[in-house]
Amino acid sequence: MRKAIVGRLFLAGCSALLLCAGPGCKATLYPAARAFGSPPESEFSSCRVHLREMQSSLPKATLTAHPPCVITRSATR
């Protein structure tokens, strides 16, 4: 357990150092993000596909607005 924590801290430190030293932010931070629980790239690609589908269907979408419902209770009964 301790080795895993030290490994993650080392990876985060190296990523921060490379981020400051070079312009490759995405390539540098991706391993650090994966080490701390970021979803895998396959999930991101699936989300991108669904986002494009949602964006293409937005012009055909209908919007329904309902008035707010406020219920007040009087202090005396």
Image (cartoon, grey):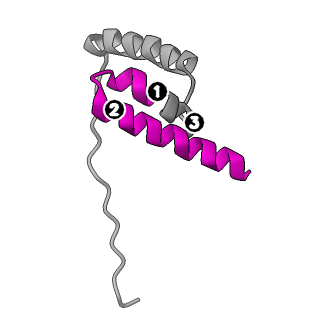
Q: Is residue 56 magenta?
A: no
- Depth check: 63 or 20 in front? 20
In magenta, the rendered stretch is 1-29
Crowding at dot 1, Cα within 10 Å, few <14 / some 14-19 / many 20+, comes out as some
Q: Which residue is mark 3?
A: 35
Please, what secondary structure does the residue beneath circle 3 have? Answer: helix
Q: Which residue is mark 2?
A: 19
The 10 Å Cα crowd at callout 3, few under 14, some 14 to 19, many 20 or more, is some
The amino acid pointed to by label 3 is: Ala
Residue at numbered disc 1: 30
Identity, as a three-letter code, of the amino acid under mark 2: Leu
Q: Position of residue 4 (x, y in %)?
A: 68, 45
- Quadrant that contains the C terminus: bottom left
Secondary structure under tag 2 reads helix
Provide residue 56's location: percent of width, then percent of height.
Answer: 32, 8
Q: Is residue 8 magenta?
A: yes
Which element carries disc 1, helix, strand or loop?
A: helix
Q: Nearer the viewer, mark 2 or mark 3?
A: 2
Q: Where's residue 35, x and y in %? A: 57, 36
Residue at figure coordinates x 27%, y 23% from the top left? 23
Q: Nearer the viewer, residue 38 or 29?
A: 29
Residue 1 vs 13, above or below: the answer is: below
**Residue depicted at x 29% and y 11%:** 60
Q: Residue at x 27, y 37 (%)?
A: 65
Residue 54 quadrant: top left
Q: Residues within 10 Å of mark 2 (few under 14, many from 20)?
A: some
Q: Main secondary structure of the magenta part?
A: helix
In this figure, what is the number of numbered marks? 3
Q: Is residue 55 visible?
A: yes
Distance, label 2 to label 1, CA atoms, is 11 Å
Task: Name which of mark 3 and mark 1 comes first in the sequence.
Answer: 1
